[in-house]
Image (spheres, rainbow, N blue to C red):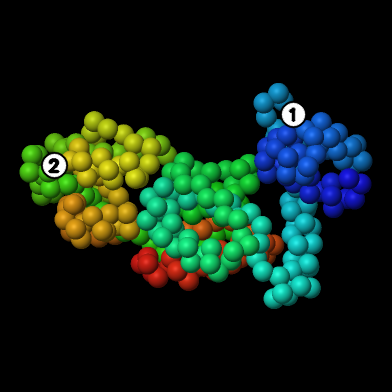
């Protein structure tokens, strides 16, 4: 591959996948061929783009600047071709989406038949996980995240807000009683997550101020869907998003607790992606679809 745009494309795939072999598969090249291509590129530019080790590739500052330029140039090429083709070209290609297990299960999966009917040429690569995905390393096009964003390097669209509720199953409440105030949670089994949170605390409004109450119980879980099932089984009290438990509350399988103490316990639901201006058409239509179909289901941002 002699063209500079071709070299840029392969280099970008190395950065996005984190390995020569994975980039080679995408470009129909061997890992050694990709390695040699990057080496030739470094020699021509006169800078080191990647720090190599037996297990990891890391961008140098020069490599980061070059990758950002490559991404813009490659996006310009794709956008130019789409612009010439106009409406005659339907959105297509692989769309990689990462979303939390509860939000994906209850909010995204029910809408996918409609999305697939609209855009049959898009191949959807969907990952449901409460673990935060590295968009660049895992080549994720769109990630849907709950709460404040830790990484400001990506563009984002707020889809809405979701209220969180403290809930328990009637079975649990019959056995252990109903807490009447946040302080009473100290005597209850409160289920919590085993990731991302430095402190096991839940926010409540007391005396006009937000107070974070420490909670503890006998079980920790790594995703909201497991937490919901543990709660339904009567194993403890949990704090979950309203979209996650609304059907259970309506059916009486769960009961909301301490609602008067947490009216402002909400978090933003955000779709993040690598760029807004240089956005592949498949990403653009998916973001538009989320704003059209998901946002109305959430409280206004």
> What residue appears at the point 81 percent right and 31 percent down from the top-left corner?
32
10 sits to left or right of 159: right
Q: Position of residue 81 (x, y in %)?
A: 78, 67
Residue 148 left/right relative to 70: left
Q: Earlier in the sequence, mark 1 or mark 2?
A: 1
Counting other residues with Cα less than 10 Å from the Cα at mark 1, is it few (<14), some (14-19), or many (20 or more)? few
Q: Which residue is mark 2?
A: 172
Q: Does any portion of residue 26 appear in the rendered image? A: yes
The location of residue 184, given as percent across then percent down, is: 13, 42
What residue sits right under mark 1 in the picture? 52
Res 134 → quadrant: top right
**Quadrant assignment for the N terminus:** top right
Identify the residue at image location x=44%, y=63%. Answer: 111
Whether residue 35 can be seen here:
no
User: Does residue 67 lie above or below 199 as drawn?
Assistant: below
Toward the viewer: 251 or 52? Answer: 251
Tell which of 56 and 253 is nearer to you.
Answer: 253
């Amino acid at each position: 591959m002699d063209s500079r745009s071709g070299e840029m494309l392969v280099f970008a795939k190395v950065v996005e996948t984190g390995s020569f072999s994975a980039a080679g598969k995408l470009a129909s090249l061997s890992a050694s061929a990709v390695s040699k291509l990057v080496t030739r590129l470094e020699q021509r530019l006169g800078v080191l783009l990647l720090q190599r080790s037996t297990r990891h590739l890391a961008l140098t500052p020069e490599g980061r600047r070059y990758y950002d330029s490559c991404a813009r140039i490659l996006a310009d090429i794709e956008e130019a071709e789409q612009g010439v083709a106009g409406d005659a070209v339907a959105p297509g290609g692989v769309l990689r989406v990462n979303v939390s297990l509860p939000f994906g299960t209850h909010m995204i999966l029910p809408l996918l038949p409609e999305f697939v009917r609209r855009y049959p040429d898009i191949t959807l690569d969907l990952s449901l996980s409460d673990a935060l995905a590295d968009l660049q390393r895992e080549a994720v096009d769109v990630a849907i995240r709950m709460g404040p964003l830790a990484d400001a390097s990506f563009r984002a669209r707020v889809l809405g807000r979701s209220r969180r509720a403290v809930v328990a199953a009637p079975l649990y409440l019959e056995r252990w009683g109903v807490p009447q105030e946040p302080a009473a949670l100290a005597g209850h089994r409160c289920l919590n997550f085993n990731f991302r949170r430095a402190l096991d605390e839940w926010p409540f409004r007391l005396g006009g101020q937000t107070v974070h109450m420490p909670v503890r119980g006998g079980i920790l879980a790594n995703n909201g869907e497991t937490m919901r099932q543990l709660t339904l089984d009567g194993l403890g009290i949990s704090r979950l998003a309203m979209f996650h438990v609304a059907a259970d509350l309506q059916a009486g399988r769960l009961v909301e607790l301490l609602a008067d103490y947490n009216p402002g316990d909400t978090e933003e639901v955000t779709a993040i992606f690598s760029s807004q201006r240089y956005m592949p058409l498949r990403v653009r239509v998916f973001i538009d679809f989320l704003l059209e179909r998901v946002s109305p289901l959430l409280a206004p941002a």
